[in-house]
Amino acid sequence: MTTPERPNILLISMDDAFAFWRFRNAFGVELQTPNLDRICARATAFHAAYCQTPVCGPSRSSFMSGLAPHQTGIFDNYSEIFELLRPEQMWSYRLKEAGYFCSSGGKIHHGYKPRPPEVHNALYSHEAQECHFGPSRTAPHKDFGGAGRGLGTTDEANDSQYYDHTSADYAIDFLRRYNGDAPFYREAGFHNPHPPFRTPARFKEMYDENDFIMPEEWKQKREPDAFAEASFPPNFPLKNEAAWRKTIRNYFSCYSHVDWHIGRVWDALQASTHAKNTLVIITADHGYHMGDKARFRKYTLWEEAAGVPLVIYDPRQDKGQVVKDPVALLDIGQTVMDYAQLPPLQGSPGRSLRPQVEGTAQEDRSVPTFFFGSTGIRHGQFRYISYQDGSEKLYDLESDPWQLRDVSPNHPELAEMRTRLKQTARQYGMFICDDETCEPPPTEYVSVQEHGKQPASPPTNGQIAFGPPDPDMPDYPGWRRYFLRPRTDMSIDLPKAWRELYYPGDIGDKADHLEVRCNDLGCHIDFMGGHQRIALRIFGGRGNDRIETAHDPITAYLQAGDNTVEAGFADATIIGGSGYDRIECQRAENRVHGGTGDAHIICGTGHDIITTGDGRNVVRGNAGTSDVTIDGGTNVIEVGPGDMVLHFQRTGLPQVVKGYKGGELDISDWSTLGPYNLSSDGRDTILTCGTERVRFVATDVAVLRQALVDIE
């Protein structure tokens, strides 16, 4: 690699992969990663690298943009990156614009499928390559037990069907074939060691589950950590040590599996013409707990979930070294810009790691990891965590690597760590309000501590708080997000300063009921994350409201304006308003009334009870069971693949039914209007009775006649 020559860049990403060097010999069994080991022997391994949030999607959005989570506004897996950021904000776009041939395969951004064409084509120089999950569930396999069941396929003919095998094949083929004049940037994204811990059986058989030994420190009684227990609760009881041994064997086997594929890609690179001119970066989105603190998961601010593997190979250096100074995962963007001879990313708090790869230390740095409004930092030998309820934890990692003993009371470093955390959080876009006064800069996210004072004016980006927003908050122009963490049941009147109310996903707050009254400027109520945590009652305003839920049951009353409701997977009751409403059901049982305005109602795959209302409506069937009552307005009913029962009441207005192929019809409300009549009109059938008229599009008259005979 000559100095003026821009290098090729190969980015390899794993999924849910802990910092493997830390756990290699922690459990009595050596983690087998021979390929990562031989790469590290020629590369720089950063042993104190940290993600900026321990959640897949937000972390990937952060390190692929070079922006911190409070700059992207993405905090959980239910936010789509390219709904909040533009492709042009990714540093890979900068490479493409600078003349790099940009290529990708596998999981780099959140999700396992390629991005939509308008995004993919902006970022990459070729058509999308899709990796599929396999082998099929019917493939010969052995059940090794433990979390995820630990399935291992026994027929080596199935090995090539694994997601990671396909991703590696794509990368290998690219490295062998690419001969363009432009330098390349290639992404190789892998699924393992992410659950469900499925591998070829031989990787499970590399480890004897009975050889794993649980650290004795884990069995000691821990000091209470109320906020952590509520926010990211334990999910793996340590009493069942046999299940733990099986599960950690499953995780180790997945790590060895992805290591094997990384080795295949590495060998292809070294055998190619690109070997002496390709920078290689290997990392993951976040770490993973191995059962410590009764957790086998991510979603915490401790070292296990915050720490990530990070390896940078520069062929000019070609010697192994370890850097123990803390670094950030989002430093990757600035590092790539440095090597590609491009200007630094504007607004990014990251730093180029090239000086450290080349042997220059960068000491005295604090690196943060965020989880909504809580923050942890690594500085020196300490990990300090400031939770949003005002509690704090300080751990000395030299004497307590598992972070089981809080040494914060009266510790001489505590005051300095508090100051460092606040300063670091601000550098990464979050202002912490924990005093009697709170005057943040207008452009930052604000984390209001549980007993802290809310800012006098709303920050431009958003606010994270436990309680409802200040009802006296003055109106300010712009769209702002309010992240609510309700500890108890509450009712909220959303002031005009806030246009979006967001309930954080992946958080274990305990409230049973929440009532929200929207303002009249048009609000976005986003409860997409989590799993049936809270019963919602939403009263729309007079603006254009958008309400989205996933697993929380909801009752919504819409008013004027053009509104959108996505009801999710829990039971829902939606009453339409006087504007134009689009109401979409998913699973479970939904009750929808179209209201006095126009409505477009999309049935789901559960059981839906639909009443059309008085406007001009469209009701679209789906794979579930739907009971549709036409009680007013003019309606177009589109029968879907599921069962649909049609109840026609007297409206005196023409109705249209499409896709009817038989099924229950109810015209009992017409009984006083006299006999009904069926007639053909081309391919359509017309049903009339007194003042009522229904056109069945492309339905044979015999089908209607049989349906009406069945109800007589």
Image (cartoon, rainbow, N blue to C red):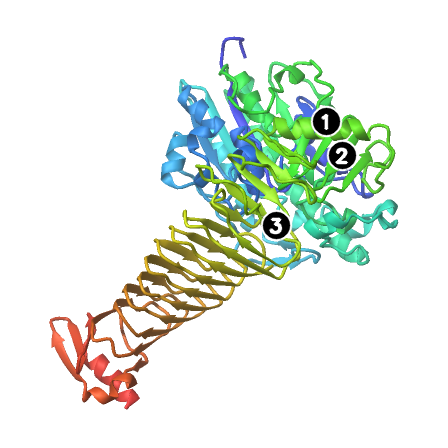
Kindly state the secondary structure of the residue where label 2 is placed.
strand
Between 58 and 508, the residue placed more toward the observer is: 508
The reply to whether discs 1 and 2 touch (Cβ–Cβ < 8 Å) is yes
Between 379 and 34, the residue placed more toward the observer is: 379
Image vertical order of residue 100 relative to residue 303, above or below: above
Name the residue at the top extreme: 3
Image position, residue 493 (x, y; %): 52, 53
The residue lying at 53 percent from left, 63 percent from top is 553
Which amino acid type is marked by label 3?
Answer: Asp
Image position, residue 125 (x, y; %): 39, 29
Is 508 placed left or right of 336 in the picture?
right
Between the C-alphas of marks 1 and 2, the distance is 10 Å
Mark 2 surroundings within 10 Å by alpha-carbon count, few (fewer than 14), some (14 through 19), many (20 or more) = many
Q: Quadrant of residue 301?
A: top right
**Image quadrant in which the N terminus is located:** top right
Kindly state the secondary structure of the residue where label 3 is placed.
loop
Kindly state the secondary structure of the residue where label 1 is placed.
helix
Disc 3 target residue: 506
Between the C-alphas of marks 3 and 2, the distance is 22 Å
Which amino acid type is marked by label 1?
Answer: Arg
Which amino acid type is marked by label 2?
Answer: Tyr
Disc 1 target residue: 420
- The label shown at residue 384 is 2
The reply to whether discs 3 and 1 touch (Cβ–Cβ < 8 Å) is no
Visible in this render: residue 178?
no
Image position, residue 527 (x, y; %): 52, 53
Which tag, 3 or 1, sits closer to the chain's start? 1
Image position, residue 22 (x, y; %): 76, 35
Between 466 and 64, the residue placed more toward the observer is: 466
Is 535 placed left or right of 564 in the picture?
right
